[in-house]
Image (spheres, grey):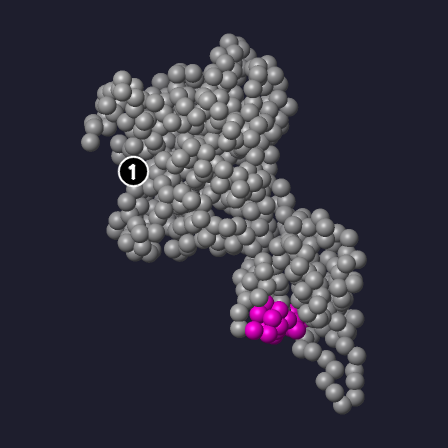
Amino acid sequence: MSNRNDHRAPSYRPHCCPCCENVSSSGNAVSRRTFMGNVGATAIGGIALTGLTWKAVSAAEAELESPNQRKPLVVQPILTYEIPQRAHQRSWRSWGGIQTQDDVDQEIKQIHGELETLKKSADFPVEILPLASVRSPKELAAVDTIERADTILLYAAGGGGDTIGAIGKMGKDVVIFVRYRSGPVYLWYEIISPRYLRQHTDELKIEGIDYEDVVVDDQDEITWRLRALCGLKNTMGTRILAVGGPDAWAQPAGVVPALVQKRWKFDIRTITYPELGQLLQEAFQDEQAVSMARERADAYLKIPGTKLETTREFVDNAFVLEKVFRALMAKADCRAITINGCMGTIMPISNTTACLPLSTLNDDGYLAFCESDFVVIPSGILLANISGNPPFLQDPTYPHQGIITLAHCTGPRKMDGKNLEPARIMTHFESDYGAAPKVDMHKGQKVTMIAPDFKAERWMGLSGEIVDHPLFPICRTQIDVKYSVSDDMVAERMPGFHWMLVYGDYMRETGYALKRTPIRWDSLG
């Protein structure tokens, strides 16, 4: 193995990403990522940003007040019920505590109160449409707000299977709520499984709805399902800017980005490095832009818990680069960006590294990733849209003694979405150049980790706890995460390469969202 401290040695090839895996006969590193970024990246991506000037791009940034936030999940609550009529010497009513119009009115009042509480307490954007109370498919068809809804929250108090069935066939996500102790007991608390889900058989028969879509009594159980669906809604169709074009770690060019576009309907916009280089050249000649970057660098370095351990010029240049990234995202009308060839290509044209800009962009509510690795990027976007927290893309190591080390040079600092973690601003490790944060992520913090496979067929999920943030000669932001399953299980089941991580436990939400995609959720707990 080459001396990793001798980053200038001609034979040295960084191992954290394959940016320099292909070497020409002359001994010069030829990056497949850089090659693709410079020739025909738009064949895989969507629309290419070309012919841009700094004046036009910076004007777009000036009009953008803040990054686009998550769109609200639009929920249509529906109460199904019936009012039975007494009949002599026969069974005339079904199970359930709703038997009269007064019972219906009281239940509507209770649902309104619960929905108001849910909306106020939700840590994700949600819009609740007016509650519809229906007794038949005909009354259901007259509800004109359903078309706007992403999700139906079905209060299955009573009514026939034809009404429940009609709701299930609307092509929308459905969460079914039934009462036992939280109010008047519902009929469908008894029969939702045999009569509807299994259709009088022993197997699940309903497409798109299953056992996990049923909630009994617990409002929190409704909330986390809606949180998952909000995350999924905001992930599907994501528009992302790929600087140097889209790529995938160690995979044939174009295969994984095409899968991402198929699985997640991503709208991948591209800009080549020559175009970026021209914009950066113009930006560095813009005295106002450079002055603003220096002011932002000053403010950043004055943040409590921030220590400068690299050349100040690298930090100033990083904020010029970040300003260009912000402007490009504004021009592309997106809140996500990824950098191809970040282990070398971007350094000569920016005179810094992309590490610090990607970190600060994540802190400010954008979604910013290095390496343009579309194997893992969808998982980061989904986690961010579920949790509302920035994701940390990192390299995993080998699991041992219940610990795995995760490291990269682009760690966000505002990992809980609110508070900045302490950070030392150092060089990017492999190049010993530029500005990269060593973020000391909070010890004791519960985290969710995702390891996607190369084929976009299986994502491994693992929950854990940060137990250390050491400083080894590896990527700058590094954490040791403790988990509760066996090392062998993790080693055998971890696919792909890069992982994603967010603060908090969102294992349930991730699995629930993935059920609506072709990707299998392999939860290790």
Asked whether, in this view, residue 182 is left or right of residue 461, the answer is right
Asked whether, in this view, residue 464 is left or right of residue 165, the answer is left
Q: x, y (%) of residue 420?
A: 45, 35
Magenta segment: 181-201
Is residue 270 shown above or below 251? above
Say which residue appears at 60% left-offset and 51% top-offset: 121
Q: x, y (%) of residue 338?
A: 47, 30
Say which residue appears at 24% left-offset and 28% top-offset: 4
41 or 266: nearer the viewer: 41
Tally of numbered tags: 1
453 or 327: nearer the viewer: 453
Say which residue appears at 56% left-offset and 23% top-offset: 49
Q: Is residue 50 magenta?
A: no
279 or 35: nearer the viewer: 35
489 or 355: nearer the viewer: 489
Q: Which residue is mark 1?
A: 470
Is residue 313 shown above or below 192? above
Q: x, y (%) of residue 251?
A: 39, 36
Q: What amino acid type should be assigned to the residue bearing mark 1? A: Pro
Q: Residues within 10 Å of mark 1 (few under 14, many from 20)?
A: some
Q: Quadrant of residue 104?
A: bottom right
Say which residue appears at 49% left-offset and 19% top-offset: 276
Q: Quadrant of the N terminus?
A: top left
Q: Is residue 198 magenta?
A: yes
Asked whether residue 460 is in view, the answer is yes
Q: x, y (%) of residue 160?
A: 71, 71
Is residue 183 shown above or below 439? below
Asked whether, in this view, residue 508 is left or right of residue 153, the answer is left
Helix, strand or loop for disc 1 = loop
